[in-house]
Image (tube, helix red, strand yellow):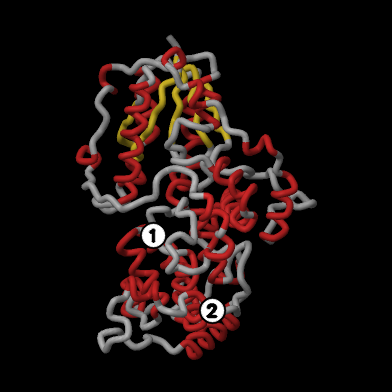
Amino acid sequence: MKITLFWHRRDLRFQDNAGLAAALQSGHPVLPLFIYDQTILEKLPRDDARLTFIFDQVERLGQEAYDAGGGFVARFGKVPEIFEQLLKDYDVAAIYTNEDYEPYATERDTAIAKLAEQAGAEFKAFKDQVIFAKDEVLTKNGKPSKVFGAYSKAWQAKAKPEDFEPHPSQRLFKRENLAALKAADKKRPTLADLGFERHEQPTPPAKLPAADVVKNYDKKRDFPADNKGTTHMSVHLRFGTVSVRQLMHQAQEVNIKLLNEMIWRDFFMMLLWHYPNTAEEAYDPKMRDLPYRDDPEQYKAWTEGRTGYPLVDAGMRQLNQTGYMHNRARIAAAGFLVKQLFMDWKLGEHYFSEKLIDYDMSNNVGNWQWMAGTGAVAAPWFRVYSPDSQQKQYDPDYKYVKQWVPEFGTDKYPAPIVDHKFGRERAIDAIRKGRK
């Protein structure tokens, strides 16, 4: 019997899943699939917390599929080789999946679509992790917007109630719509099989945030000492363990500020899809050859939270210990690296990519380029945030700092590694001279 493979990537859930719902209505029994992509995994440390998180979600999906009377395939290797073998092992009518807008993912999907075509199978990708993607929100002249305010206004004008409607994937996920496993696929790879060690980091439950958190988000979001000031949904948005439609619908009804912050995700994914080169280089050609400084000792002090600026240091230590950093601290830490130290934004982007459990390329690249003044949407290059001012405004009692920097206020805490005024003037002068 012909089957439809449903390939999970950034959508580790069965409920409200656009591509899975379409697969379950394809006319063929569905076999869910997850591939531990060797090309990605070989770049990760052996104790990567994200891999443990993904593994646990895959195991949960495998159990849920079994409980529903179906199977779940998990394989490890190079994606094209895995699909070549799957197309031999199963009589595949179609491969369904949800879109991914990162450069590597789009190239990979193009290759798999060709493989499917050669085998006589369809390849279909659906929009699931955003409300609007690609060319759905453009300016009047048909170009991607480079002004977030205008994009957000157009996005909200375009959004209709049906855009937030859940897909019926959970209701359709039942025995009569599911395919059986081959014997060889009944055993899924373990963490040890993948070459990884277990490394857990605490994550919030995969459910909508509490009503009071959403209601007060606009008032509390900027204060890192308040653990209930933000939704803590970023890891679930990154891996699709919750539905973006449900989260954005909740925000739309309760707190427009939260909705607007989530619209940034759509915006940055749209920009990365249109300008994939920005993952590796500045969007603005004038800003691609700036004379960034190379100072390994100061960079190391930044990564370890030893800059002498408490808000920066608290953020970096929170990141190193938990895989998470409050957004206000991210702004302070990123601004310090690219302006006060005047180092290449790609250094910071890469470090965050290794440490953040919620790492999302489009968001990370977009925000780092915004801070550096190099992006399609960017803060003015001459804007330099003061870490001291940020401290006084957002953590005046040093509650956040004292949580992560216990030696603050003692003679063990280091003096600032650079004077703010000196660093600011150095960066502005270097950018002014380096712009082409």
- At numbered mark 1, what does the secondary structure look like: helix, strand or loop? loop
**Residue ID at (48%, 42%):** 105
| First in sequence: mark 1 vs mark 2 | 1
Instruction: Say what amino acid the circle numbered 1 marks.
Output: Tyr
**Residue ID at (51%, 59%):** 365
Residue 55: image quadrant is: top left
Residue 80 appears in the figure:
yes
Q: Is residue 424 above or below residue 190?
A: below
**Number of numbered discs on residues:** 2
Q: Is residue 206 left or right of residue 383?
A: left
Q: Is residue 204 left or right of residue 388?
A: left
Q: Is residue 112 above or below residue 4?
A: below
Q: Is residue 123 left or right of residue 145?
A: left
Q: Marks 1 and 2, Cα distance to the nearest angstrom? A: 22 Å
Q: Which mark is residue 182?
A: none
- Rendered location of residue 269, percent (x, y): 57, 50
Residue 275 appears in the figure:
no
Q: Which residue is mark 2?
A: 385
- Rendered location of residue 327, percent (x, y): 48, 64
Q: Is residue 434 above or below residue 243?
A: below
Residue depth check, mark 1 versus mark 2: number of the one nearer the observer: 1
Q: Which residue is mark 1?
A: 324
Residue 130: image quadrant is: top right
For label 2, the crowd category at 10 Å Cα-Cα, with few meaning under 14, some 14 to 19 and many 20 or more, is some
**Residue ID at (57%, 68%):** 374
Instruction: Say what amino acid the circle numbered 2 marks.
Output: Tyr
Q: Is residue 205 above or below residue 304?
A: above
- Rendered location of residue 175, percent (x, y): 41, 15
